[in-house]
Structures are given as structure tokens and as C-alpha cells.
Amino acid sequence: MWVVVDGGYAKRPFLHRATAVGAVVVTRLRKDAALFSLPELPRSQGRGRPRKYGTQRFSLAKRAGARGGWQTGEFEMYGQFRAKTYKTFLATYPPVGGPVRVVLVREDHGWFAWCCTNPQASVREILEMVADRAAIEQDYHDVKEVHGAGQQQLRNVWANLGAFNALLWLHTLVELWAWDLPQHKLCDRSQSPWDDPTRRPSHADRCKALERACFAEDFSKLPLHGRGSRKIRAYVERLLALVT
């Protein structure tokens, strides 16, 4: 079982419990995380337990600032293959209690550090897991921001669970309705010159497109006849565009 978490979970209580049940944890690291080198193998078995951590302290900022050691690879992230520049090395991390695989990723707006409790994990496994988590996190963002999850004024815990379940189904049905529709039917950015016209439709765009489709179906059933019907229809269509 793989568990991918944000930096808020990169703490000893969670990591020890997760690794104790055999889970592999991938977590984001703070840029000042206390990382150490691997312990040196003892030449002879002496008294006491062998060392868990090395004596050399690693600085993520210095490693990210060094020009050497960067590699480039293509990984399947967010539904397409993307080139990423990264560094990877092994270290020991006290909250884990042993060795970890560390991956530094350089982006246009800075660098990020990730670690995996399985030192044998590949960079591909780690980065693609991180990308999968981001997609799930975006779904939770849409459920909260677009559909208003958590804003229901319900006192009973089961009523809150039922409301959240209904919103998850609403999110799923909207995505299913828009699954095969082309981009130009889901969003029209001609009235937003500041926006990127090639940006993929968001979940909010899909909801607005569904609202427009529902309004258009209801409006098409109205008995509009006569000389002014064309002007009235054009006016109502502009009004519906403003509403949705």
C-alpha cells in the first residue's frame, strides 16, 4: 500500500505508524528538513547497537543550488508525458527512523523536495504518485469550492455525511456528462481576453456548460412566435449567457 501525503504529515507519529503496517509513504519535505547521510558499516561488531544515521548533515537548499547532478526524464503526469529535471539521493531521516529516497524537482518557480520511505523506489514511481495525489486533491477542491461542501448548515453528523455523499455524486455526474464533449462546448473564453484560450476546461466550466444546456433545453420549448420572436430569442440567449 502506497500513501502519498503533504508535508504536514511528514512527522514521526504518522510515519512510524504507517511504516509499521507495511505502507510505503511518499511525502513532501520541508526545505530545512533534517537529513543525514547513510551510516557507515562497522568494521567489527562491537558493543551497542549499530548507528541508524550518518554523521554528515545534508542541506536540501545547497543540493538544490548546486549546478551538478541534475537529470532530465519524462514521466506520465496529469494525463500526459512531461519532462522533469530532478536530483535523487539516499539519506536517513529521523522521523522515519531509517533510510529514505529523496527526490528534488526543479520547476520554473522554484524547487520541491519529496522523500519515499522505500529507498528502492524509483524516481518514476515517486513523481507519478505525487501527480496522482494532485489530481485527487483537485477533486476535493472542486467539491468544496464549486459545490460548497462543508457549507451546509446541518447539525446531525449523519446529515452532514449524507450531504457530502450527495455532493460527491453531483461532482461525478457532471464529469460523466462532460466526458466526451469537446472543449468549445464546455467553455468559451472569447469574452475573457485575459485568459488562456487553450487552458483545459475546469470543473466549474463543466458545471456552467451543464447549466447552459439545461436552460437552452427549457428555452427551446417556449412557444415563441411572431415578428419579434427572433429578437426576443437573441435577447434571452444573451441573458442566459450572463446568468451562466
Image (tube, rainbow, N blue to C red):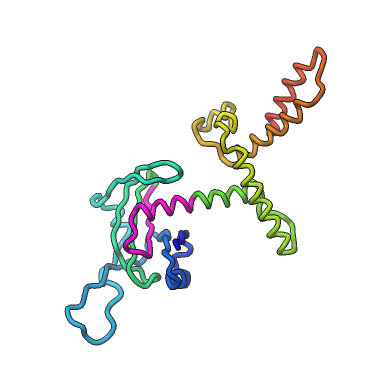
Q: Quadrant of the N terminus?
A: bottom left
In-front residue for pair 242/134 = 134
In-front residue for pair 81/96 = 81
Residue drawn at x 34%, y 65% as measured from the top left: 100
Residue 122 locus on image (x, y percent): 33, 56
Q: Quadrant of the C terminus?
A: top right
The relative height of residue 126 versus residue 44 in the rendered view (above or below) is above
Q: Is residue 131 magenta?
A: yes
For residue 240, which quarter of the picture?
top right
The relative height of residue 67 versus residue 218 in the rendered view (above or below) is below
Residue 79 locus on image (x, y percent): 45, 43
Residue 118 locus on image (x, y percent): 36, 64
Residue 127 locus on image (x, y percent): 39, 52
Q: Is residue 114 magenta?
A: yes
Residue 54 as seen in the image, left or right of residue 32: left
Tally of marks: 0
Give the residue furthest to the left.
43
Give the residue furthest to the bottom.
47
Residue drawn at x 68%, y 52% as measured from the top left: 166
Residue drawn at x 43%, y 53% as measured from the top left: 130
Residue 116 as seen in the image, left or right of residue 154: left
The relative height of residue 66 versus residue 120 in the rendered view (above or below) is above
Q: Which residues are magenta?
A: 110-134
